[in-house]
Image (cartoon, helix red, strand yellow):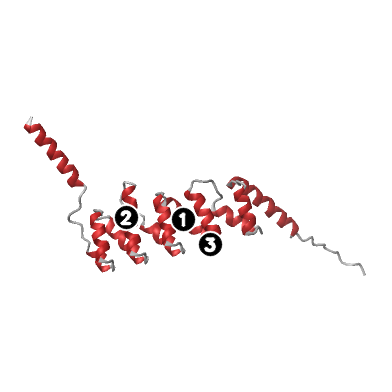
Amino acid sequence: MRIRFLFLGLCVFFADGCKQHPLTDYRPLDKAGMGSAEVEQLKALNVSDDEIPQIVKLKNARLTDEVCVSLVSIAHQHQHIFNSADSVSSLAGAGYAESQILDIARVDHLDTISNEAVMLRLIGLSNSTVQLLLDRHLQGVPTLSSTQISRLKNTGLTERQVLERINAGMTDEQADAEIKRREAARNHANTDFIHLHGRRSR
């Protein structure tokens, strides 16, 4: 019986030990300019060797130390390591605030939403519209893709008109049909009929 308990104790010990990273090199974080207090918080979060370069990328993207720690902590709460530095850097580069990035992280959608969120910025939508669309994505509410929004704008619709269609529940397929109708109408309106006149006989 004693041997059995000893065996179980060793199993627990090694299981817990596998989750620890006592030899992780934190010096790259110091070189990246992270404060000692935040480094200690990351040590408490037991970051892995693979997460260190990810955090350095966040620092290079000029995110604050507090947000770096929060992103790692949120990833661990979702029971996976933090490996979304590229997505976060893209969002930050597109002008998203740290609070918005954290909102995306909290629903564990950094890698699934980042490209779409960046595109919403690139097509020139106002901040309020970008936030509204981002909220819809975070809440899982169906909404038009950035591609279709851009195409609708290119047909001459205003941002307000696009929003009206989104709020009415327009799908990408419905948007595609309207785009084709509007493009066809525009092409027809721009058609020039050229009349060819023959030479007059002398």
Of residues 93 and 13, the one nearer the viewer is 13
Badge nearest the viewer, 3 or 1? 3
Residue depicted at x 7% and y 33%: 3
Q: CA gap, disc 3 to disc 1?
A: 17 Å
Which disc, if any, is residue 115? Answer: 1
Split into 4 quadrants, where in the image is the N terminus? top left
Residue depicted at x 69% and y 50%: 181
Dot 2, how many residues are within 10 Å of its Cα: few (below 14), some (14-19), or many (20+)?
A: many
Above or below, comparing residue 137 to residue 88 in the picture: above
Q: CA gap, disc 2 to disc 3?
A: 27 Å
What secondary structure is found at the residue carrying circle 1? Answer: helix
Spot the residue most to the right: 202
Question: Disc 2 designates what residue?
Answer: 72
Tell me whether the residue at label 2 lies in contact with that at label 3, contact meaning CB atoms closer than 8 angstroms. no
Which disc, if any, is residue 127? Answer: 3
Residue depicted at x 60% and y 49%: 167
What secondary structure is found at the residue carrying circle 3? Answer: helix
Percent of width and height locating residue 115: 46, 55
Q: Amino acid at mark 2?
A: Val
